[in-house]
Image: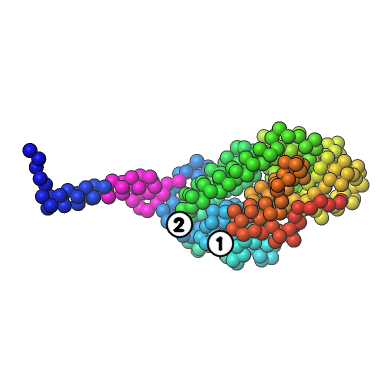
């Protein structure tokens, strides 16, 4: 015998079922987002610290050169303060930084410190009342939290010349994405970096350019001369170039932004091709004019000297780094990069990272992709 359920009973069953489903979904979403009853999210930063940050972050301060990544993550509207070098005030370099060129409105924000001088203005940060602060070390983070009472997350924005450093950087983007509510954007950016790395490697892996290379004028806390270089120069790593300075490739050097070599060492290496960071060009040419022995280096004799964008300017501009890699690839492996217009590629990269094609703006003050004589 089949029992017929009345309309009233059926309605009650439907209501009860709906309530159960709603509560079930609420529980799942609560668990998935790991949000506490106080409206916070638990994050583990790159220093291994567990930090409770607001579930909704509307205001943020980035110390230790982390404003760049905040812009990369499409969260520039959340910034309430910048560092001195990023401004357009006296001593500022904002007009030479891709992310500031793309977002000039940021250059007029209050100054909260200066990572180049290890200065953090705790009073100004407290006054601005951001929901969260980013810092570059556990020591800085703990001090900021103690002095301001604002949750502070350690992130990595430094060199990416080794695979370990690059992995740390990508993880840092993911952490920042979670804090800022920009998880999808962080995924998009990491995937784009991966795609560029894969593309550059596929074009150059197992292909010999039969040329040794050297980066001169590697910037670090300012511009430098011809003997400032980098054994882990990322654009060289990305296109499998034969970097003569890799002979200095040590674990210690991996943490450095630049190393200084002896003049005699560069002459002994005698590279086939020299690339110069554009911001250091004047200093490098001064070196070569005062030291005629540099003229005997093969790259200079043969006219194989090129300028690239100054990837290291107030820490590392990852967009410029990748753009430089494509230009260097074009110079060293013309056949493999025959389909690449370095300037157009650069603007594609800048648009992805900072939202605007700013290559021409950078080329003016600091030099772009060009073959030169020194």
Residue 90 location (% of width, % of height): 69, 65
- Image quarter where the N terminus lies is top left
- Residue 123 placement, left or right of 316: left
Q: Which residue is mark 2?
A: 57
Q: Which contiguous range is marked in magenta? A: 22-43
Q: Residue 246: x percent and y percent? A: 74, 36
Locate residue 231, reporting x and y percent: 73, 39
Relative to 124, is 241 on the left or the right?
A: right
At 23% from the left and 50% from the top, the residue drawn is 19
Q: Residue at x 73, y 58 (%)?
A: 363
How far apart in space, not on screen, are marks 1 and 2 (Cα)? Answer: 15 Å
Q: Is residue 75 among what the camera can see?
A: yes
The x and y percentages for residue 371 are: 81, 51
Q: Residue at left 75%, top 55%?
A: 368
Circle 1 Cα neighbour tier, 10 Å, few/some/many (<14 / 14–19 / ≥20) = many
Disc 1 marks which residue? 81
Residue 155 seen anywhere in this rendered image of the structure = no
> Magenta segment: does it hold 316?
no
Dot 1: element: strand
Depth order, front residue of 18/293: 18
Closer-to-camera residue (5/65) = 5
* Along the line of sight, the residue nearer the viewer: 281 or 47: 281
């Amino acid at each position: 015998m089949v029992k017929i359920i009345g309309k009233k009973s059926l309605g009650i069953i439907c209501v009860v079922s709906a309530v159960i489903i709603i509560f079930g979904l609420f529980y799942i979403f609560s668990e998935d987002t790991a949000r506490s009853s106080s409206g916070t999210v638990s994050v583990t930063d790159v220093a291994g610290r567990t930090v409770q940050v607001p579930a909704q972050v509307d205001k943020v301060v980035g110390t230790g050169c982390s404003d760049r990544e905040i812009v990369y993550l499409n969260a520039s509207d959340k910034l309430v303060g910048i560092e001195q070098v990023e401004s357009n005030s006296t001593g500022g370099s904002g007009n030479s930084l891709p992310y500031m060129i793309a977002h000039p409105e940021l250059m007029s924000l209050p100054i909260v410190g200066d990572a180049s001088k290890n200065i953090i203005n705790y009073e100004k940060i407290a006054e601005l009342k951001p929901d969260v602060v980013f810092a570059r070390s556990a020591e800085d983070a703990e001090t900021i939290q103690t002095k301001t009472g604002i949750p502070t997350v350690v992130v990595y924005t430094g060199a990416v010349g080794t695979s370990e450093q690059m992995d740390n950087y990508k993880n840092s983007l993911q952490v920042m994405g979670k804090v800022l509510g920009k998880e999808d954007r962080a995924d998009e950016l990491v995937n784009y970096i991966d795609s560029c790395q894969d593309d550059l490697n596929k074009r150059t892996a197992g292909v010999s350019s039969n040329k040794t290379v050297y980066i001169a004028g590697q910037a670090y806390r300012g511009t430098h001369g011809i003997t400032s270089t980098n054994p882990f120069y990322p654009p060289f790593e990305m296109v499998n170039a034969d970097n003569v300075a890799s002979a200095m490739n040590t674990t210690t050097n991996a943490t450095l932004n630049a190393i200084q070599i002896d003049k005699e060492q560069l002459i002994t290496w005698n590279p086939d091709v020299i690339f110069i960071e554009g911001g250091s060009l004047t200093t490098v040419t001064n070196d070569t004019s005062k030291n005629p022995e540099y003229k005997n280096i093969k790259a200079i004799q043969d006219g194989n000297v090129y300028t690239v964008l100054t990837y290291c300017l107030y820490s590392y501009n990852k967009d410029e780094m990748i753009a430089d890699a494509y230009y260097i690839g074009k110079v060293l492996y013309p056949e493999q990069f025959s389909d690449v217009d370095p300037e157009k590629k650069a603007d594609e990269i800048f648009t992805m990272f900072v939202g605007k094609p700013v290559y021409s703006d950078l080329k003016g003050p600091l030099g772009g992709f060009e073959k030169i004589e020194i």
